[in-house]
Image (cartoon, rainbow, N blue to C red):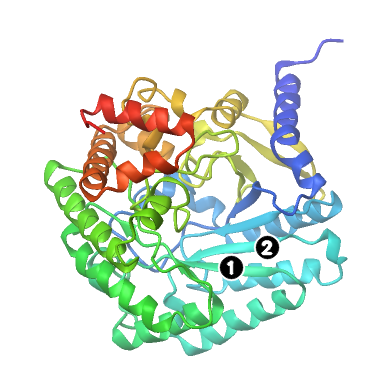
Amino acid sequence: MSLSFKEQNDLAFASFLDRYFIDNFKKRPKDNRRGMEIIITADCNLECKYCYLQKRKEALYPQDIREPETILKNIGILFDWIIKNGLRLKIDLFSGEIFSGTLGLKVLWLIYDKYKNVPDDNRILRIMIPTNMSFLTDAEQTKKVVEILEKLKGLGITVSLSASIDGKHLEINRPYKKQEEDRNDEYYETLFQFLDDFNVGCHPMVSSMNIAHWKENYQWYIGMLDKYRKKSTLPLVPMMLEVRDDDWTDETIKEYLAFLDYVVNNEFARTGKDVKSFAHRVFVKPLIAYDNVSLIQRYGPNNGITCAIQKMLYVRAGDLAIVPCHRTMYDPFILGRFVVKNDEIVGVEGSNVALAYAIHSMKGELQPGCEDCAIEPLCTKGCLGSQFESTGDLFVPAESVCRLYKARTVFLLNKYLEMGILQEGFNILPEKSKETLARVCREVGINA
């Protein structure tokens, strides 16, 4: 008897999950580059001006599936399935702001209860949580956060926080929805002490909005990290990722390049103006996962998309939908869902299986608009969700983001030519990489 289209679609989606994720989780490699991100809720206590989740919350995570009790129940069902199937993986917990209320703490205590009697070799490897760190304005909430971090650590499950803070001079971009404690100098002293105590890195967003403030903000960051980086293994610089929204103008790109010039000069000076070591950072090994002064970008598992979309299995907790990522949770892009019966996951059903395979098999250099671009080998490239929001197509690049990264790449190549760093790059790179770099230089008109 032939299978119906739905049955074939469900089998194809189950095969996709097995091939790309579940089989990998069962093999349990300690250096596993793949994991699962559980998207808890879209609710947040901040109203950041550039935040897509605030602008498109209802479309990405509808109100009718943001009921806390349902979210907790579904997360419990999901972890029962993970434990039952012996999946040893890395977990990311994504949210609007996980610690702005009680839901995030309840999620962590739920995970603790699920694993407290599970053998060591069947536990998740770690939990990563981005947070705006506003819980530090409340001593009681801070105490509760530290308590559950320590309890999970006692089980051998490390919880790594990642501080989503733009910094003292960019507060204008990240207002509270309602009046709460000020993020004043005292708050930032407390914050950076916490970062050092708990080894928490920072990932501020470099938005086109108020970009002119970034020079002084960067210098403030460096001063605070130098002052408080005592016990931790934190990097010497924050991860300053550009917001890849289609709102960059000629003027804001010019301001960004002035900021980048300032960063390069300062970072080079901090190495003692050592050309060889700085060239190694630029062309071989960036200081952090996204290093503004580097011309080498890290790709996904198959040299594909430069963000984490190909590395993680993204699950929206409110309805157990499996989505491409937290910025592409729109209805047409839902890849499939976990099927639950009697509070137990019994299978999956496919929705947009073709998109699942398209995203996870995609090579970076073959993205539409990138194939013939001169700077492609050195480009960070766009965000699929942002591209959909600006062009109506996940795979069509946003025009102003392309202009931003072309300007960035050409600026850095010229800057490093002047500093002698580009020449040193040619000395230390392997032959194939030299050829690629030389080709980029020729195509953008740089005589290297």
Name the foreground residue: 420 vs 269. 420
Numbered label attached to residue 160: 1
Label 2 crowd (10 A; few <14 / some 14-19 / many >=20) = some
Horizontal placement of 367 versus 85: left or right? left
Residue 170 point in image, percent of width and height: 25, 67
Q: Residue at x 42, y 80 (%)?
A: 192
Q: Which residue is mark 2?
A: 126
Where does the image place residue 193, in percent across and percent down from the top left?
Answer: 45, 84
**Residue drawn where x is 62% and y is 26% of the image:** 353
How many numbered marks have been drawn onto this rendered protein structure? 2
Can residue 282 be seen here? The reply is yes
> What amino acid does circle 1 point to?
Ser
Q: Is residue 173 above or below residue 241?
A: below
Q: Residue furthest top?
A: 1
Q: Position of residue 135 (x, y in %)?
A: 46, 78
Crowding near the residue tagged with mark 1, few <14, some 14–19, many ≥20 C-alpha atoms within 10 Å: some
Q: Residue furthest front?
A: 427
Position of residue 319 relative to residue 83, above or below, is above
Say what secondary structure mark 2 lies in.
strand
Q: Nearer the viewer, residue 318 or 444?
A: 444
In the picture, which quadrant includes the C terminus? top left
Distance from the alpha carbon under mark 2 to that under mark 1: 8 Å
Q: Secondary structure at mark 1?
A: strand
* Label pair 2/1, CB-CB below 8 angstroms: yes
Find residue 405 and report its image quarter.
top left
Residue 216 located left or right of residue 329: left
Residue 317 appearing in the image: no
Query: Sequence order check: which comes first, mark 2 or mark 1?
Result: 2
Residue 277 location, x and y as percent? 40, 57
